[in-house]
Image (spheres, helix red, strand yellow):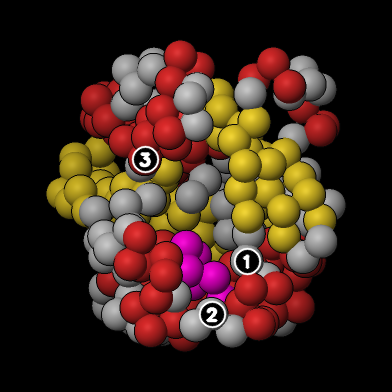
Amino acid sequence: MISSERQEHAISSRLVSPSAVSADLSETNDYNGFAEAYTAANETNLVNAYYERPAMLALAGDMAGRRILDAGCGSGGLFAALRDRGASVSGFDASAGMLELARQRLGDGADLQVADLGSPLPYADDTFDDVAASLVLHYLEDWGPALAELRRVLRPGGRLIVSVDHPFAVSLIHREAGHEAECDYFDTAKWTVEWTVGGRTALVSRWHRPLHAMIEAFIGAGFRITVISEPDPDPAARELFPEAIAANPRFLCFLFFVLQAE
């Protein structure tokens, strides 16, 4: 059974038709407005705590002594885990509210900055051994500028470790909801969900893109793909979330890449 605490902090998600979403960007992706509720969910839920974050750490491997950039670090969950494994970590996020929570978690000495992925980043060329981009690229319609900046701050031979929405899963979500016409697998298309967590409701928009478009963007930015991963959840998830795992044993949700800077 899922504990009452996990039920309280679970994120429920409902697909929203594009016609119901305002063109006003301030009405979507307001992470400042629901930073605390999202962070609480992120700490204990299946999707983040027992699936995405363990998979990113497994792909990262031995971090001791490496300099890592956490791109879109949010409230610092992955940052903390990388630092605990001996890495020297820097992080940035567009949400000042999320970064405030990260500072509370990580301490005032943590290297955290407000910056937008896709804009020039406040780091010198060839600074990092690795960049972790956890569930952040899919917020961008155009990956080109973001990948160019991440390649710039990586040393030659450095790694970019990425997790994004799995395009097959996004396509399936739309098909099962009867909205397949709004998200053709082969198109790059904006899609929106309504999240409810901790008594708060928020609209979150992301960009679906097919696998071939992802690969073309990575190669075009000067990366070589070394790993494409579709992992299982952490083994503990089977006991903590038995109904969710029984309904979807492989829990196909995100797609993971390890890329090497050429």
**Callout 3: helix, strand or loop?**
helix
Callout 3, which amino acid? Ala
Q: Would you name the residue on which mark 2 appears? A: 2
Whether residues under marks 2 and 1 lie with C-beta atoms below 8 angstroms apart, the answer is yes
| Residue at which label 1 appears | 10
Q: Secondary structure at mark 2?
A: loop
Q: Residues within 10 Å of mark 3 (few under 14, many from 20)?
A: some
Residue 240: image quadrant is bottom left
Whole-number angstrom distance, CA of label 3 to CA of label 2: 24 Å
What percent of the width, then of the height, locates residue 134?
A: 46, 54
Residue 215 against residue 39 in the figure, above or below: above
Q: Residue beneath label 3, please?
A: 169
Horizontal side of residue 192 vs 169, given as left or right: right
Span shown in magenta: 44-49
Tell me the chief SS of the magenta region.
Answer: helix
Dot 1: element: loop
